[in-house]
Amino acid sequence: TPIDGYQIQYCTNKDFKGRTAKITTAPKNVSVKKISKLKGKKKYYVRIRTYKNVKVNGKSRKLYSDWSDRKTAVTKK
């Protein structure tokens, strides 16, 4: 079944715990998502999952896939 979008989670903690863990969403037709306001010369851990909007008992809900494996990225400057 087709998906409705993606959730991207990024954090400086490899376990994605604490206040620094952030989640942003992207629609299904986006292949590149730029995340701004990150600190320079820092290592970030990133993971992604898909979601689909479904109706359950007349209410709209999101069903999520499992999180992907964790990837690392180092910011410039």
Image (cartoon, rainbow, N blue to C red):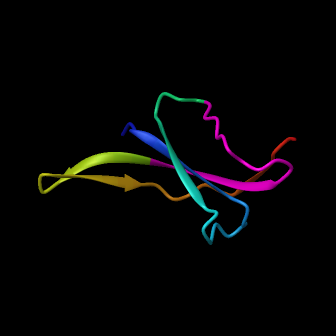
Q: What percent of the width, then of the height, locates residue 32? A: 62, 31
Please name the residue shown 62% across and 71% down the image: 17
Q: Quadrant of the C terminus?
A: top right
- How many marks can you see? 0
Q: Quadrant of residue 22?
A: bottom right
Position of 50 with respect to 13 (left or right) is left
Which of 32 and 68 lies nearest the eye of the viewer?
32
Q: Is residue 72 left or right of residue 53?
A: right
Q: Is residue 1 magenta?
A: no
**24 sits to left or right of 18:** left
Residue at image point 26% right, 48% down: 54
Where are the magenta residues, as a range?
32-50
In magenta segment, residue 49: yes
Which residue sits at x=33%, y=52%? Answer: 62
Image position of 42 with respect to 26: above or below: below
Location of the N terminus by quadrant is top left
Quadrant in the rendering for residue 11: bottom right
Percent coordinates x, y for residue 68 in the rendering = 60, 55
- Residue 11 or 71: which is nearer the viewer? 11
Query: Whole-percent x and y of residue 29?
Result: 48, 28
Residue at the spot 67% in from the left edge and 53% down from the top edge: 46
Q: Is residue 51 above or below residue 26?
A: below
In x, y percent, where is residue 18? 62, 71
Say above or below: 17 vs 51.
below
